[in-house]
Amino acid sequence: MWAVVCCLQGPWAETMMYAAMMKGHWVFFQNCHLAPSWMPTLERLIEHIDPGKVHKDFRLWLTSLPSNKFPVSILQNGSKMTIEPPRGIKANLQRTYLKLSNDFINSSTKMGT
């Protein structure tokens, strides 16, 4: 199951993220560059994720244009993808996901990813 949330809706995004962590859903926060004031909150939320308490199927996807307000720690601890401009969000995510190999997905050294 997917939950798509614009980062401008910070409190709702936080609620959705916690629910997805417990249920094993995927959450997609789009256009994070439009919410620079919420980026420290997002960084704090991600830093405090306890892999031992999060459903193994939980995934968090973020999109952003280049921004100096985007937290460096999130960039350093996540998998980054750069692709051509999308022709639609569904087609873009499907194309990106289908290009990932199992070796790439399993190469993460982070627990719970």
Image (cartoon, grey):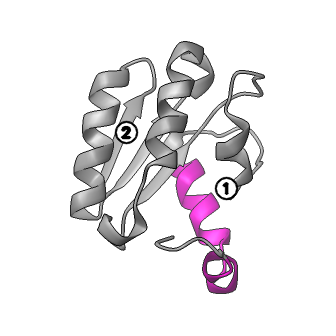
Looking at the image, residue 62 sits to the left or right of residue 10; the answer is: right
Specify few, some or many for label 1: CA neighbours under 10 Å numbering under 14, 14-19, or 20 or more: few
Q: Which range of residues does the magenta coloring cover?
A: 90-107
In the image, residue 61 above or below residue 85: below
Q: Position of residue 32 (x, y in %)?
A: 56, 27
Location of mark 2 (residue): 4
Q: Position of residue 37 (x, y in %)?
A: 54, 13
Q: Quadrant of residue 8?
A: top left
Looking at the image, residue 63 sits to the left or right of residue 58; the answer is: right
Q: Quadrant of residue 110?
A: bottom right
**Farthest bottom residue in view:** 103
Location of mark 1 (residue): 77
Marks 2 and 1, how far apart at CA: 21 Å
Looking at the image, residue 66 sits to the left or right of residue 20; the answer is: right
Type of the residue with mark 1: Asn
99 or 34, which lies in front? 34
Q: Quadrant of residue 101?
A: bottom right
SS assignment for the magenta stretch, majority: helix
Q: Position of residue 51 (x, y in %)?
A: 41, 67
42 or 13, which lies in front? 42
Residue at 67% in and 70% down: 99
Residue at 77% in and 28% down: 66
Residue at 52% in and 47% down: 47
Residue 93 located within the stretch drawn in magenta = yes
Residue at 67% in and 33% down: 71
